[in-house]
Image (cartoon, grey):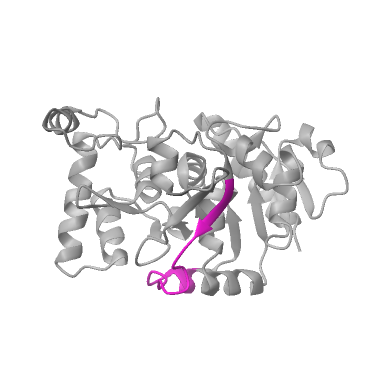
Amino acid sequence: MKLVMLCGGVGGARAALALYENLARHSLTFLVNTGDDFRHLGLEIWPDWDTVYYHLAGLNDPVRGWGRADEGTRAMEELARFGGPHWFHLGDRDLALHVFRSWVLKEGWDRRRIAVHLAEQASLRCTVLPLTEQGTDTRIQTRDGRVMEFQQWFVKEQGGPAVERVLTRSTGQTPLTEGVLESLREADVLLMAPSNPYLSLGPMLAHPELQAVVRKLDIPRLAVSPLIGGKAVKGPLDRLIESLSDFRGQQAIAHYWAGWVDGLMLPGDEIATVPEPPLRLLEGPTLLSTPAARKEFCQALERAWEALP
């Protein structure tokens, strides 16, 4: 059975790890958000892809949730001493990945080749593809009238300025990475990870070619809510819901995914918080902090997609 999951951020990375630990690895394809990708210090940075990759490879920092474990800080300390921009932290080991990726891009590699090479280096037995061949330039329009690059808003400004709209530019002109459409057309199940729908998954689905294929798929399509107890585990999702949705909590997530998927998985005790649901609600645990919890999550996922038409 072939599974494809759209994912980004820490929530998506943890869900990817859950599938990788508990399901047939060779059957898994993870399509990762490229809306956060940008160039910094002359280097090609893929924040969401790197987070998913580090989790699957067992290299992630479990405390922060992002970046490498056993990481050094000397490069950023020197950069700060020189007066360079150090607001976007790159650890010493992490920096090596960005240097390598930037180098091979200049040597003519495409993104699929880079992703496959790095997966092989980590002995991964699944497919992890960046969605597009270039970043799709997610930007934030704030309520005070500014338009900010995503990383400036999210990292430099710590997600502080109130959001009016999330903008995704250049999607129509940016080709999908080789293998993305093929994986979708061969899939038996499509999953939407418990990622931030506005910042991670929405920018992916804004791509017109991807959007057209996802809407036509005649397979079970299931989203997983990123909320627990009606609140985000971490990150700015709660504030984004207040700014961008007419609903609150799980009801906002259900209405976001209506029309995109056949069902939404969320904690069973929260189903009643979604009156007149616009799509089918399915019960399942979504806190993925331990191996046992991730196993239970995958068991619930299998029950959920088997219940869908």
Q: Residue furthest top?
A: 63
Q: Is residue 153 left or right of residue 210?
A: left
Q: Is residue 174 magenta?
A: yes
Q: Nearer the viewer, residue 244 or 257?
A: 244
Left or right of 69, for residue 256: right
> Looking at the image, which residue is at 33% across and 43% down?
57
Residue 3 visible in image: no
Q: Residue at x 59, y 55 (%)?
A: 191
Res 107 → quadrant? bottom left
Percent across and percent down for residue 266 are 70, 41
- The quarter of the image holding the N terminus is bottom right
The number of numbered discs placed on residues in the rendered structure image is: 0
- From this view, report whether residue 213 is shown above or below residue 42: below
Residue 83, position as x, y percentages in the image: 15, 33
Magenta range: 164-183
Asked whether residue 122 appears in the rendered view, the answer is yes
Residue at 34 percent of width and 42 percent of height: 54
Q: Is 191 or 22 nearer to us in this picture?
A: 191
| Residue shown at the point (19%, 32%) measured from the top left | 76
In this rendering, the answer to whether 79 lies above or below 192 is above
- On screen, residue 170 versus residue 239, left or right, reads left
Magenta stretch holds residue 12:
no
Q: Would you identify the image quadrant in which residue 73 lies?
A: top left
Q: Position of residue 128 (x, y in %)?
A: 39, 57
Quarter assignment of residue 102 = bottom left
Please name whichever residue, 86 or 60, is drawn nearer the observer in this view of the structure.
86
